[in-house]
């Protein structure tokens, strides 16, 4: 496995240079284990809103004793778990690591490709195809990859998540394992890209029927309904709810599973999904002996808040608040376990978000009279197609529109002898006129300019010349795109929490702007190794100058 990794990326990242003062065995200042607690849909204001209801061992413990980066962001145009996880794990932007979206068009092969789907590899842990995944399309190394290199494979690197894309892109290329929940079987699984033989302890975990145990429960609120004063009413009429009809507590999970086609995906929308991830992490630390020798190890644990149903209920919902109150207990148990096992100073913990969540446009407009709205991509693309047919002649000019990127049909453009750059510019100018679109930028313009700083920098960060679309779009603040038959799945909120804890870190706060690309270099400084040469972020000085 390790030889496979070296062959794969040697041309991309060599030579690596280990700092002269670097070390890969335990010293007085080196944490024995780095634990990343990463949460999808983690808005910074959740901490303040729910603070009084949190216990003292989870979020409150980290915030009271840790170092807080209070102005922390992802500098990417497209705020997707795929894009942001690759950024967090590699310490660089999509323009270098190449994960510019969930999927894109490979121009050489003229086909759509997914960020992690890879049928060369097989599922390990179940009979489904949900393990056919790899990090082959990730173009730069992760910090975990770097740690494996400088310790000659002796460091252990793992990731655990509910979703495959988070697990794979957190683990990177050389990890010992990446695990996630299989929607079809309800088991924790991996890919043969990482694991040749499924470990017995993981078989035992799946055999414990923990998923069935949680599914047998009704989801009821942790506290009395009257205690959820920070949320809107549980019967708020504009909540879509499960299957468009169930939007109030309690929820019969077995019934929802049956009505949604038998998929175990329903667990990913409840607090129990997070609890399963926590239980699996505790077993992994014990059974894989993470942090139990003189070589530092890394573990990334990714929790998902409401996941697929987050916009069916929304950030002001009782469902979201209850999820966080229960997640607080899971984090408290995880922290207690690792501190009891290693001691606070021998672990480095960071808590951060993978994405935020935007507040519903309709709610913000009606309740607070803010400028907001719903953008309909389907009708806009239909108008764009008509415009292109009038200007350039009949043809299916648009090959793909996905998550703020438009791909034009290059073969058709070449066949009809149309100037590609002219069409890119025409599309960008046309879309810029729509209400709800702040900017539409042609690939030609992004290539020709260097947008450093300001509102245009995210375009630069998210643009990869071989993978990005012909036109990239940024929506107006408060506007959200929603197709007629698809659930809302968009955020423009780039800010997430970041808190550091353990490893001799003193309590403090900085309001200085920090970027997700800074996390990897900061961890590298604590480990005493140089970060990968592809890193574009910087170690956070307030933490590393000790």
Image (tube, rainbow, N blue to C red):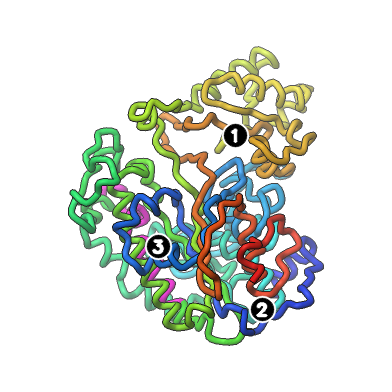
Residue in the picture at 57% in, 87% down: 293
* Residue 533 lies in the magenta stretch: no
Picture disc at residue 153: 2
What residue appears at the point 44 percent right and 62 percent down from the top-left corner? Answer: 63
Residue tagged by mark 3? 59
Badge 1 is on which residue?
400
Question: Mark 1, residues whose alpha carbon is within 10 Å: few (<14), some, or many (≥20)?
Answer: some
Q: Principal SS element in the magenta part?
A: helix
x and y percentages locating residue 366 in the rendered image: 34, 27
Q: Quadrant of residue 279?
A: bottom left
Q: Nearer the viewer, residue 449 or 546?
A: 546
Contact, CB < 8 Å: mark 3 with mark 2? Answer: no
Q: Residue at x 69, y 69 (%)?
A: 146
Residue 231 in the image: above or below residue 532: above
Residue 526 visible at all: yes
Q: Which residues are magenta?
A: 259-284
């Amino acid at each position: 496995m390790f030889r496979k990794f070296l062959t794969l990326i040697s041309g991309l990242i060599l030579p690596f240079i280990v700092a002269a003062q670097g070390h890969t065995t335990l010293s007085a200042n080196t944490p024995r284990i780095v634990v990343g607690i990463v949460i999808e849909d983690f808005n910074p204001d959740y901490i303040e809103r729910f603070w009084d209801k949190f216990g003292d061992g989870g979020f409150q413990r980290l915030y009271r004793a840790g170092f807080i980066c209070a102005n922390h962001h992802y500098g990417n145009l497209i705020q997707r778990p795929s894009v942001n996880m690759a950024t967090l794990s590699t310490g660089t932007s999509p323009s270098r690591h190449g994960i510019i979206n969930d999927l894109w068009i490979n121009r050489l092969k003229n086909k759509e490709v997914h960020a992690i789907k890879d049928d060369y590899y097989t599922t390990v842990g179940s009979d489904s195809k949900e393990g056919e995944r790899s990090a082959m399309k990730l173009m730069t190394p992760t910090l975990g990859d770097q740690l494996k290199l400088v310790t000659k494979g002796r460091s252990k690197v793992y990731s655990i998540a509910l979703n495959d894309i988070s697990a794979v892109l957190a683990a990177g290329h050389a990890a010992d394992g990446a695990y996630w929940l299989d929607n079809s079987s309800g088991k924790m699984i991996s890919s043969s890209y990482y694991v040749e033989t499924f470990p017995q302890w993981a078989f035992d975990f799946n055999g414990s029927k923990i998923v069935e145990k949680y599914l047998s429960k009704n989801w009821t609120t942790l506290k009395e309904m009257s205690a959820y004063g920070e949320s809107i009413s549980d019967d708020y009429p504009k909540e879509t709810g499960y299957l468009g009809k169930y939007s109030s507590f309690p929820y019969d999970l077995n019934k929802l599973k049956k009505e949604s086609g038998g998929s175990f995906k329903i667990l990913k929308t409840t607090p129990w999904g997070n609890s399963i991830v926590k239980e699996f992490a505790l077993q992994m630390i014990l059974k894989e002996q993470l942090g139990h020798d003189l070589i530092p190890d890394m573990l990334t644990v990714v929790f998902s808040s409401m996941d697929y149903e987050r916009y069916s209920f929304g950030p002001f919902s009782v469902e979201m608040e209850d999820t966080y109150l229960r997640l607080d207990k899971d984090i408290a148990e995880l922290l207690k376990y690792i501190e009891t096992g290693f001691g606070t100073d021998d672990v480095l913990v960071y808590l951060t978000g993978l994405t935020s969540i935007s507040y519903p446009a309709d709610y913000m407009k009606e309740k607070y009279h803010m400028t907001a709205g719903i953008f309909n991509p389907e009708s806009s693309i239909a108008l764009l197609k008509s415009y292109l047919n009038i200007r350039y002649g009949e043809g299916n000019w648009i090959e793909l529109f996905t998550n703020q990127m438009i791909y034009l049909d290059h073969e058709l453009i070449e066949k009809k002898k149309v100037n590609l750059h002219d069409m890119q510019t025409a599309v960008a100018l046309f879309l810029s006129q729509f209400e709800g679109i702040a900017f539409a930028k042609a690939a030609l313009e992004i290539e020709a300019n260097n947008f450093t700083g300001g509102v245009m920098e995210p375009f630069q960060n998210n643009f990869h010349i071989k993978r990005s679309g012909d036109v990239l779009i940024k929506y107006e603040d408060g506007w959200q795109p929603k197709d007629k038959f698809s659930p809302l799945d968009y955020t423009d909120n780039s800010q997430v929490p970041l808190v550091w804890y353990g490893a001799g870190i003193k309590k403090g706060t900085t309001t200085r702007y920090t970027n997700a690309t800074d996390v990897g270099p900061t961890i590298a400084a604590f480990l005493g190794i140089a970060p990968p040469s592809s890193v574009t972020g910087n170690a956070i000085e307030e933490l590393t100058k000790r």
